[in-house]
Image (tube, helix red, strand yellow):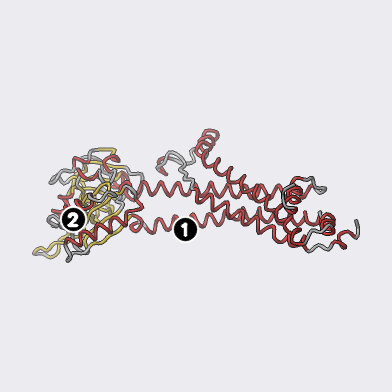
Amino acid sequence: MFKPVPVAIGLRYLRAKRRNGFISFISLASILGIALGVTALITTLAVMSGFQREIRDRMLQMAAHATVSGYGEPLQDWQRAVKVALEDKRVEGAAPYIEKISLILSANSQPAMLRGVVPAQEDKVSVLGQKLVQGKLADLQPGSFRIVLGRELAMWLGVSVGDDVLVALDDFRSSPVGGVQTMKRFKVSGIFEAGYNEFDKGLAVVNLQDLQRLLRMGDGVTGVRLKMHDMDQAFDVARDLATKLQAGDPRSGFRVSDWTQDNANLFRALKMEKTVMAILLSLIVAMGAFNLVSSQVMLVTDKQADIAILRTLGLTPRQVMQVFMVQGSLIGIIGTVSGVLGGILLTLNLDRILQGIERLFGVQLLPEDVYYITGLPTDLQASDVGTIACVALVMAFLATLYPAWRAARTAPAEALRYE
């Protein structure tokens, strides 16, 4: 009794039994359409966010959060760079590295990134030591010319621990007969499996000093790799470090990059894929909104006499419009809330549902040897859920405008003529 008249009538229309049962069915279909669309959107985006997080985490296990390197020349005073970096409380670890494109030859040949590391410091910036399935990182002693290969790379080359491989670098040295390519035979001392194809098939690791000798770099390195407590601060920390090093040696220049820049194309593609999928699935919500338009138009037609009586009792066209906007918006709210709850519950139990389907039909939907995962990763983000709910509510509200406007234009005399 304390509600405004349009709201009270709109709520009554939502609860009251209609003479035309088909209108009720269309309204129910509208609610289900909106709910299913919202559920599908929330679950799909959660799965895509989960895969994106899984790729990012596996990539950053082996890659640095940020790097500081010299411009066009090796970084000589890397010890000071490491010391300055570790003085920053935002930095968890720092270690020097050398990277060089190489061609590794055995029974087959495969290009790979050859990375020189200090075994004792590598655990501070990556989990390479934990990913070894054969051998130990400590076996990469200076002067031993041993190499650790990714599992896919070792399988492609047809080698295992104890075999020799020939490493050819894109570095040439002069000789009496002309330029000679730098080549060196290494013994395989370990194999790692990162679960990320870019590293498992495209990365080989050797001792930093061995690679310095091959490239005749002296004490220089490519740069310093940094690991942060918060990866989102990577670029800011690396830039601050470069500024401090520049202050100590004004003649030197430094190049700063973080994980978002080094893998910009990958994350841009993932973001675009997620956006396109969200747009396509939002069409399901739009279909529910179109059903809402149909149900509201039919309701307005069915309630012509009621509208005429309300107008003669003093209800203005604006209030009549509000009646049907309230009734239609409530349908949208019920559908959206149901979809949000359904999407959250489905996402939280998706892994169990997947396992149940696999047991029921005796199939494996996500083979571990293909996808390198043992379940379906999901990442339910509050921002995605909020955006989806807002879009669904806006669509439902817009769907009520035309039927409500049509109801407001009803002429009482015409509507009551045949009653």
- Mark 2 crowd level (few <14, some 14–19, many ≥20, 10 Å Cα): many
Question: What's the residue at 26%, 38% (across, down)?
Answer: 134
**Badge 2 amino acid:** Val
Q: Which residue is mark 2?
A: 221
As helix, strand or loop, the secondary structure at mark 2 comes to loop
Left or right of 164 on screen, residue 339: right
Q: Residue furthest front?
A: 2
**Are the residues at dot 2 and dot 1 in contact (C-beta closer than 8 Å)?**
no
Q: Which of pointers 2 and 1 lies earlier in the amino acid sequence?
A: 2
Front residue of 414/201: it is 414
Number of numbered tags placed on the structure image: 2
152 left or right of 15 in image = left
- What is the three-letter code of the residue carrying label 1? Met
Q: Residue at x 27, y 48 (%)?
A: 89
Residue at the image point whose x is 58% and y is 51% from the top = 389
Residue that carries the numbered disc 1 in the rendered image = 272
